[in-house]
Image (cartoon, rainbow, N blue to C red):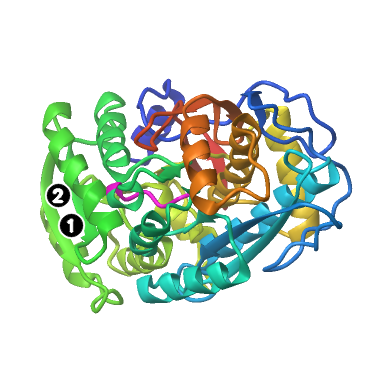
């Protein structure tokens, strides 16, 4: 099966959902920013120091206040920390280059611990601070809870990575990433079209909208791809430490591949337990697996050959990715993951839309939202997670696909 995986990786990537980085060189400085072909996104500035939860205070004058929400502690902290870091980096670059429509940007980020109730509390904290737009939330369940609140306030919301359909169900909300159903269908298409496996087991979290949304679309598309789902084993938030039963059923059913539409913490446990059982299938996941190499005390050798759909590969050779990775690594001491790239693109997308819409600091939150909603359907962005990204009025992006495979302890573009 490992040889089969190698052959599949050598083929042309032909699925249709996860995002790809631009191969064009943006007209930017050393810290290359996503380029807006409409919306006049500014060039990135050099030598800025990114802050922590709150980016450096803007200079005197008009200020646009953008809030952010995501998990910087808890089981999904790898995602939220990356989003916070990259957003701060983008804000500092934008401010150094003159801001947005002459306004400096103030950015404040609140931890929600990947919890819906805490995310709503974080939203209220940011409202008290004077937030005028929201870049968040990072994960799907909290995002779905918060979008109901932003809709009530008619506040513009752009989530970098909230992928559940419900996460942007309101007309004020847009996203950078692709939706869960698209990830599920694309995964089945890739496995089928590249003949990676025909007998597939699925282990998914039935208590999580992200996981169930991907699984349902995967199962529907699998039938069209000649894939037999030999086992579909669920777990819940209350039972996510022992996967021996699910793995045993997958093994007994003859699964050649195990599809994991779950987050990286649980995936690391599954890979560890599969190894102790001498069960060695191909493991295939979606963007939730990004972060598995950073799990504390996890033997990353167990992740060798794991494949996942992702909108960003840090080793891509385009100039924008190289510049972003270099700057991010210098500032934060680590290689950025896809969530960092999503957030960086999100801040520059807000900039492009705000410039297209003629946003000013004295506009009401509701007036800003109405103008941004229209502008989002009129801009085109060349970002880290896609070239020529556009948005429809329902908030969904349109961009090209990408996937990575874990090789020698690192994500490698395919």
Whether residue 290 sits left or right of residue 207 in the image: it is right
Residue 211 visible in the current orientation: yes
- Is 135 displayed left or right of 334 in the figure? left
Main secondary structure of the magenta stretch: loop
Is 388 displayed left or right of 18 in the figure?
A: right
Which region of the structure is painted magenta? 161-165
**Mark on residue 251?**
1
- Indicate the quadrant where residue 226 lies: top left
Left or right: 121 in relation to 102: left
Q: Is residue 414 visible?
A: no
The quarter of the displayed image where residue 208 is located = bottom left
- Give the residue at mark 2: 254
Q: Residue at x 84, y 33 (%)?
A: 29
Compare residues 90 and 238 and report the one nearer the observer: 90
Quadrant where the N terminus is found in the figure: top left
Secondary structure beneath dot 2 equals loop
Instruction: Please give the name of the residue rendered at 33% of the width and 58% of the height, measured from the top-left corner.
Output: 262
């Amino acid at each position: 099966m490992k040889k089969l995986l190698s052959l599949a990786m050598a083929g042309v990537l032909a699925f249709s959902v996860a995002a790809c980085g631009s191969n064009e060189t943006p007209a930017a400085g050393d810290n290359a920013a996503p380029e807006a072909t409409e919306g006049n996104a500014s060039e990135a500035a050099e030598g800025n120091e990114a802050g922590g939860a709150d980016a450096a205070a803007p200079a005197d004058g008009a200020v646009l206040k953008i809030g952010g929400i995501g998990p910087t502690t808890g089981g999904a902290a790898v995602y939220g920390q990356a989003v916070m870091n990259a957003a701060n980096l983008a804000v500092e670059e934008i401010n150094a280059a003159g801001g947005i429509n002459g306004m400096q940007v103030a950015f404040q980020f609140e931890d929600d611990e990947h919890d819906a109730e805490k995310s709503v509390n974080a939203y209220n904290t940011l409202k008290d601070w004077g937030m005028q737009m929201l870049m968040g939330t990072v994960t799907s369940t909290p995002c779905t809870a918060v979008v109901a609140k932003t809709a009530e306030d008619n506040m513009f919301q752009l989530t970098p990575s909230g992928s559940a359909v419900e996460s942007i169900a309101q007309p004020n909300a847009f996203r950078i990433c692709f939706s869960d159903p698209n990830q599920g269908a694309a995964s089945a298409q890739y496995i089928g079209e590249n003949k990676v496996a025909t007998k597939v087991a699925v282990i998914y979290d039935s208590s999580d909208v992200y996981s169930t949304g991907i699984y349902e679309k995967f199962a529907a598309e699998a039938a069209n791809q000649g894939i037999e789902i030999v086992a579909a084993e669920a777990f819940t938030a209350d039972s996510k430490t022992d996967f021996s039963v699910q793995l045993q059923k997958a093994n007994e059913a003859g699964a050649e591949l195990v599809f994991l539409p779950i987050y990286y913490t649980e995936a690391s446990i599954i890979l560890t337990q599969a190894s102790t059982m001498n069960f060695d299938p191909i493991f295939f996941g979606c963007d939730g697996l990004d972060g598995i190499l950073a799990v504390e005390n996890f033997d990353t050798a167990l992740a060798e050959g794991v494949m996942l759909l992702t909108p960003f590969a840090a080793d891509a050779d385009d100039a924008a990715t190289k510049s972003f990775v270099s700057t991010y690594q210098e500032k934060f001491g680590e290689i950025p993951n896809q969530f960092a790239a999503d957030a960086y693109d999100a801040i520059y997308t807000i900039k492009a839309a705000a410039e297209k819409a003629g946003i000013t600091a004295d506009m009401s939150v509701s007036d800003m939202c109405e103008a941004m909603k229209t502008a989002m359907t009129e801009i085109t962005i060349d970002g880290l997670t896609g070239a020529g990204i556009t948005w429809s009025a329902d908030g969904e992006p349109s961009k090209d696909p990408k996937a990575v495979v874990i090789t020698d302890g690192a994500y490698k573009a395919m």
